[in-house]
Amino acid sequence: MDEYSWLHHVDDPEVSAYLQAERDYHDLVTAPIQELSEALRTEMVRRTPEVDRSVSYRLGEYSYYTRFAEGTEYGTFVRESVSGSGSAEQLLDLDQLAEKAGADYLGVGVSVVSPDARLLAWSVDLAGDEVYELFIRDLTTGIDLPERMPHTYYGAAWSSDSRFLFYTVNDEIYRPYQVWRHEVGRLPSEDILVLDEPDQRYDVSVAASRSGDYIFLTSECRDTQETWLIPTSEPTRSPVSVGGRSKGHVYTVSHGGGDRLFALTNSGSACEFRLVTGSAAAVLASGAPAILEWPEVLAHNPDIRLVSAEPFQDRVVVLSRTQGGTRLEILSSLGVHEHEILPTRSAGSVEFGINLEWKTTTFTLVDHSYIAPSTWWDIDLGTGAKSLRHRDQAPNYAPDQYRTELRWADARDGARIPITLAWHKDTALDHSAPCLMYGYGAYEFSYEPEFDASLISLLDRGFVFAHAHVRGGGEMGRKWWDAGHLQTKLNSFFDFIDVTDYLARHVVDPERIVSRGGSAGGLLVMASLALAPDRWRAVVAEVPFVDVINSMSDPEIPLTVNEWDEWGNPSNPEEFAYLMSYSPYENVPVDLTALVLLTGAVHDPRVLIREPAKWTAKARHLSKGGGAVSGLAGSGATASGILFRPELGAGSHGGAAGRYAHLADEALTQAIILRASGVA
């Protein structure tokens, strides 16, 4: 029984009125903290450079980057000749585009320049639903060609002669399920279907190899993958499968130049993957050879998760994870170890930057930390030496005033859970400081410790930030995901609770811990709240996946069928019972003492707004006084109650877009966190 299923009909006037009423209530009870919110926003703006530019990347004879003029949200995509001759050439002015469309939101899906550098394939979403319209711009005139492709998704690739463009489209439930080939100058109605994936468990994608010689088409679900190959010089050729498809076999393919392919594969019981190499000609001649039989470049190591392999002209660079951290390893083309690159800062991370050139002596990496702006380095492939390429700017910020470290907490079953901490150097870790806990723990995804200038406002007010890397994520390898999804998902929530207990015993004030998570992280914090309702002072659940049973039972909505391999299928009685044991909507605590803030967006295609709306409605019914909020008006008192912030206009799963637009929401969220903790 679902008493609030009427909230599924978001276009119904009664549902619109309900959502508006919740937004009105949110705005009413947060009115007393608007002054604090505005002060926080001002701080965040001061740490955002008025004039800025992104890191550049080279492709052919040009260097590409995005520059921001004072007051702009989205920036301008530009390029410069690597020879240094001529001025910067403006390719796409995103702020002008948003203004012309009268849009409050703008998201770019693809921006891919053709091999001859004359055309730009670019797509835009002006609502936040991740449905993009694809255009082709003539860069010699700056004018878009007449043809345009609606309902496209991320990913695009050009043929070597710049005549054909491959792109993906999504279906009525937002699944990218087809790859099409467009011939420049012809009508989109004449486009050719290249790949169709009828199995709703799978998503498709398309990308060109760094060498420019091949186009890779991929179809994947949570635990199975298949990749096809098309030579860019033969764009009308039918795709050929590289390794076939078998349940449980995951492999990613890259081109190492000439006839050589590389693949990261979990074949041969390689849970954490191994690197193998094979012949592109053999694939094109016979199709679907057994990757298991390809010669091995790097053997499987159960303690090191091989994440990605990037071949260059005479080297291969491998990104791997071990003991909760990342590293990059430069190998010879034969797989001999030559150099290792580690994060610059303790508890930081390294990952690949944008590397589009294959014939190069250097590659670019990005160095992340919670307490230092991201830095890009060019690494010499022969010596491992690094030179500074770009550092993000953060005015009015001094990194040496902050500290970060990696700690470990013991879970109840003996597993050791990594925790990344960040704090101001003047904040004592002696049980007196309030704490903001963050977590995600799904899809084998690892949120790296990336700098966020807005977080500093909390650290400056004495908060300790703690990122709990619970099972279900990928911080400790694929086995970490295996131990935190499907019938082991409860481990994610128990880990989060156990990390909270560790922090309360050893680091922070046990009475002032706030949890925060978004999407699957919203499920994490809300399911943990159901299991331990008195553990957190406040809970912030952004676009939270809280209606697990009903969503996973409805194959007509986005992300259901291809999510069964992550959460389980309720049509199976055993899986239904397990999902029921933790689904937040079925396990709403009665008479909550914490302050709970949920958010949602009507255009969000990933977590439909009905999920936080239904949880809120049910929680209000079960709470005395309807979950009315108290304690936000005055400083020094802790707050409680239920708040729901629905975004009724344009807005995406990730919130507002642009450099400044999201800061108002973030500042208000932080003001709520501060008041809920009795800090401001």
Image: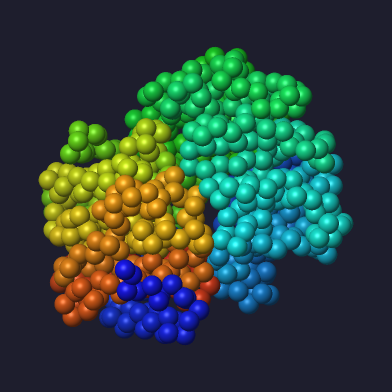
Dividing the picture into quadrants, the one containing residue 445 is top left
Identify the residue at image location x=84%, y=53%.
Answer: 184
Q: Is residue 394 left or right of residue 346?
A: right
Where residue 477 appears, as percent x and y from the top left, is: 39, 33
Does 106 sit above or below residue 9? above
**Can residue 151 be seen at all in this image of the molecule?**
yes
**Which quadrant does the N terminus fall into?**
bottom left
Q: In front here: 461 or 260?
A: 260
Where residue 120 appears, as percent x and y from the top left, is 75, 53
Tell me the residue at 70%/63% (across/down): 150
Residue nearest the viewer, comparing 599 with 63: 599
Q: How is the image coloured?
A: rainbow
**In the figure, is residue 572 to the left or right of 429?**
right
389 is higher (above) or lower (below) than 256: below
Name the foreground residue: 27 vs 370: 27
Image quadrant occupied by the C terminus: bottom left
Residue drawn where x is 86% and y is 57% of the image: 186
Where does the image place residue 329, in percent across and percent down from the top left?
Answer: 50, 25
Q: Quadrant of residue 600?
A: bottom left
Observer able to see residue 467? no
Report the label total: 0
- Among the 4 quarters of the image, the one containing residue 43: bottom left
- Could you tell whether 317 is left or right of 528 in the image? right
Left or right: residue 352 versus residue 227 is left
Residue 533, given in percent of the width and then of the height, sits at: 18, 60
Q: Residue at x 35, y 79 (%)?
A: 22
Q: Compared with residue 510, is residue 384 higher up or lower down, i.e. above or below?
A: above
> Which residue lies most toward the right here?
185
